[in-house]
Amino acid sequence: MKNWHWIALGSLLIASLILEFTYLADYASHWWNHVPAFYALWGGLGCAALIFISKGLGKIFILSDEDYYDA
Amino acid sequence: MMLELLSVPAVILILGALVLPLIPERIRSTVFIIFPLVALAMVWTMPEGNLLQASFASYELELLSVDKLSRIFGLLFALITAIGGVYAFHIKDLGQQSSALAYAGGTLGVIFAGDFFTLFIFWEIMAAASSYLIWARGTEESAKAGMRYLLVHIFGGGLLFIGILLHLSGGGSLYIESIEPAYTAANIFILLGVALNTAVPPLHAWLADAYPKATITGAVFMSALTTKSAVYVMIRLFPGWEILIWVGVIMAIYGTIYALLANDIREILAYSIISQIGYMVTVIGIGTEIALNGATAHALNNIIYKPLLFMAAGAVIHATGTSKLSELGGFAKKMPLIIGLYMVGALSISGMPFLNGFVSKTMISGAIGDAHLEWPILLLLIATIGTFLHTGLKLPYFTWFSEKKSEFEVSSIPTNMKVAMGMGALFCILFGVAPQLLYSQLPYPTDFQPFSVYNFVEMTQILVLAFVGFWFLKRHLNVSSTISLDTDWFYRQPADIVRTVFVEAPNNLFGTAENGALKLANKLSKFSGNPMKAFLPSFIMEGREVRSDGFTAPISAALAFILFGFLVAILVVLL
């Protein structure tokens, strides 16, 4: 990842936040529309939760050796 | 009647499968593509209505029922079969080509079936023809996986058929129409049969088991046809069955978690199918007009980008000979075009604005929002994040961009494969920037507008933050040489016991019984040859053997003399 990649992503995020707080300020069709930057939070937390939950489940019982069924 | 059958698109493709062996090898691939194109033109020009009837026993079958829903599915299936034909243009394997055409024919037959019997027959043709696409890989692993795939689908077909028979004997209609949500035995069996092909957990394991082991080109057809045709049947039969709402949400999350864990690139994509079908099943459960439109639109988009992703994965396998993330990496510079085309499909499926996934995913969230079901929206968003993580980031990063994990050659990829991928990507972009092309073909009229500021803000924030999360947590993702245990464990692990109890034990029993019967027959025939021998055994007297079943020479001579005397007497009397 080069610096300009991060800058591009950052500007996209900032643009979406500006739109959220100006154009969509009064928009409310779901309860979470009142939470600022909800989708950014949901995206980040959801991503971390998925990675760690799948890792945990994989350790507990899902992942096995490739020759599991042949052994 | 025979000529009228030629107006059925499914028959054209199945006829194609039968004609292909007679075509010289050098033009066979071209002829392969002509059949789905003819079917495409037929579907395009057919009027709506029930176009062809046939009598079977006391039933009037509807072989060709066309309406908006079946037409758009038919068009997309014919189109993707033609594109798949371009992708497989370099393949000379007649068996694969014929079975792919028969498989697509079965799919079109299911789509235009107006009654349960026609549906069931084409349903089984699909299962049988697609099995060969797994076996054609020619490895021991694919031979076993193909057999499991076939057995599971025969089981699913059996469930469906039991349901149909119960439905008919209970006074239900032979014709395909939506079923009222009532949990009768007939409805449950039909639902289970359809759910198996829709890959609803726990009936889904065949998909992730078989698709990664199919041939490179076979998996492309499979990823488009089986599950999406089952979704079509579900839209027809089970709209508004509320249980499907949560079944769909669970599917979406379940597929995501397994896709995040998978090491085989086609296994990631296979689990991602299950996750995507979850979205469709959820809105089928809602059953409103916009919900069914959303399910249809998402299924149609899946018919385009799933094969595109499988084509790119196939290109990787073709070039490197491996499909495992634990062995790939470090050759992004050698296939920039393939990566670009893959990313079009991957970003489409992740819901990036101006690609086709966005226009159907927003419709689905809209439909769920209208039904005031908040948690399904949030949970499906988690599945969207997961989709971006595994298909949009994990797979391309660890396949092409991360450090090289083993030594392999990168051979060149046939042009026809790239052309087919280009066609798939073109439709992803086309429907993404001009959603009206898609929306105008949906079963119900809609004025849905996907390009709203709200939807842009939502997807931008989700995708940017999911990317950031991936970048900093990617070392926690599994790329080791492992496999995932899934519900196929229940029929794979006890396979030896099942074989012992249900195959070897009856075999041994029959074998023992057969040997016993043969021995007995042998003894009886010997005994009945001369029963005297059993009652008067031979013995030795004064040094000579006295045989109970034989005669001494003098007695034989005497008997012969008496016989001769009789003969003479008869001659004297007669003359």
Image (tube, helix red, strand yellow):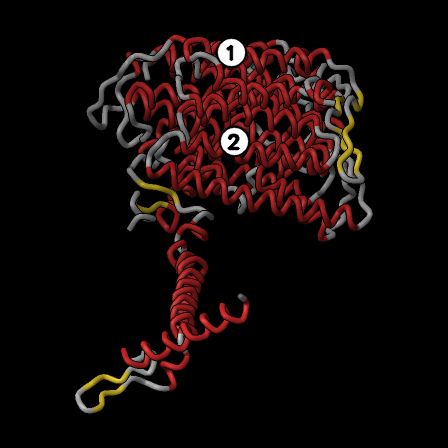
The relative height of residue B377 versus residue B42 in the rendered view (above or below) is: below
Q: Amino acid at mark 2?
A: Ala
Q: Which one is nearer the viewer's eye here, B507 or B299? A: B507
**Residue B105 coordinates in the image, percent (x, y):** 59, 24
Left or right: residue A27 versus residue B332 is right
Q: What element does badge 2 sit on?
A: helix
Q: Is residue A49 visible?
A: no
**Residue B233 coordinates in the image, percent (x, y):** 67, 33
Q: Residue at x 58, y 9 (%)?
A: B430
**Do pointers 1 and 2 mark residues of a single chain?**
yes
Q: Residue at x 37, y 22 (%)?
A: B396
Residue B129 bears which disc, if any?
2
Label 1 environment density (alpha carbons within 10 Å; few <14, some 14–19, many ≥20): some
Q: Residue furthest bottom?
A: B542
Q: Is residue B166 visible?
A: yes
Q: Are marks 1 and 2 in contact (CB under 8 Å)?
A: no
Q: CA distance from mark 1 to mark 2?
A: 19 Å
Q: Which one is nearer the viewer's eye here, B389 or B265? A: B265
Left or right: residue B556 versus residue B27 is left
Q: Output the chain of dot 2.
A: B
Which quadrant of the rendered structure holds the N terminus of chain B?
A: top right
Residue bearing the label numbered 1: B31
Label 2 environment density (alpha carbons within 10 Å; few <14, some 14–19, many ≥20): many
